[in-house]
Amino acid sequence: MKIDKEYPATHSMSTTWYAVDAEGNVALMDYNENGPVPHGLEENYIPELILQLPANDTGNIPTASYTEEQVNELLGKRVDLDDLEYGPIVVELKKCREEAFIKWAHKINTEAFGHRAIIRLNPKLDYYAVNDRGRGKEFENMLNNKWFYNIYSCFWEIDDIWDKETQNVVWDKTFTSVPFYIYGQPYSNNLRMSKIHTPCHPVKIEQLPPDVQRKATKLPLSFAETRKLQIAEFADCSIMENPRFEYKGQSYHYLPDSNGEFMYIAVGERVASTPQKLSKEEVNKLSNGEKEKTL
């Protein structure tokens, strides 16, 4: 994600991960720099999560469980060979080239040490996603020798841009469709996470591999009905600043809740006996030595 030049960039918690709503829909949650971010996340980006969805790794090539409608949503702009830029692409393979292509893809994926350089998007369709690891000399020869009916540029990125006139964040995206809800957290944690994209055919939790299903953040809300949210209300999070208040071993940060009201919200390892949120008035009472029963 791009950072406005006025923002300092001295540290980073930037990452993207899967979340699931109460209806089983999957979202990609993209966080920029400061957090809050749920504990234990690996560094990832939107293209990596889109191309690391395979639920079946038992064959010669990892195969995702995207439906035909979702594959159509994934296809980006169709491009000619001369206009092809670097980055992830999707190709529509000619059937006569399938055996040789899958053999090559298996070799490249094996050499990628656990990274999926090439995946099939659907077991019955001839669409294959190829990321940067797969775009070597051999693949360029395939392109030049016309192994594919069509080539699609798939540059999936979002940018948060600070608008000086409106004093607000404006979101930009490089795609028109993907089968995921997408939320973005701006650099400033004084702002809530915003919904950037709504899919026509959202990926469901059962389409994720079992280990990814377990790790996905479960949220008690509907993505279709939720325009903004505060992830620290729903998950144990880390944040790149010192806490504003501590109570019974629980750290609190002054953040907007999902409704936009600034509250002291518990961040870090949750202490079960403490409130999840505190108002400014409640914090003032505690700070002034009021009895804890007022909570």
Image (tube, rainbow, N blue to C red):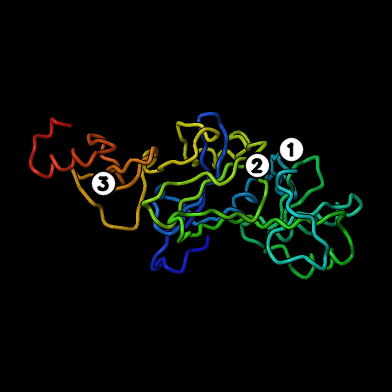
Q: What is the quadrant of residue 27 in the picture?
A: top right
Mark positioned earlier in the residue sequence (3 or 2)? 2
Identify the amino acid type marked 3: Tyr
| Residue 234 appearing in the image | no
Foreground residue among 280 and 119: 280
Q: Which residue is mark 3?
A: 252
Mark positioned earlier in the residue sequence (2 or 1)? 1
Q: CA distance from mark 3 to mark 2?
A: 35 Å
Residue placed at 18% from the left, 39% from the top?
281
Residue placed at 63% from the left, 37% from the top?
202
Mark 2 and 1 residues: CB-CB less than 8 Å, in contact?
A: yes
Q: Which residue is mark 1?
A: 69
Q: Which residue is mark 2?
A: 179
Residue placed at 89% from the left, 61% from the top?
146
Identify the amino acid type marked 2: Pro
Q: What is the quadrant of residue 143 in the picture?
A: bottom right
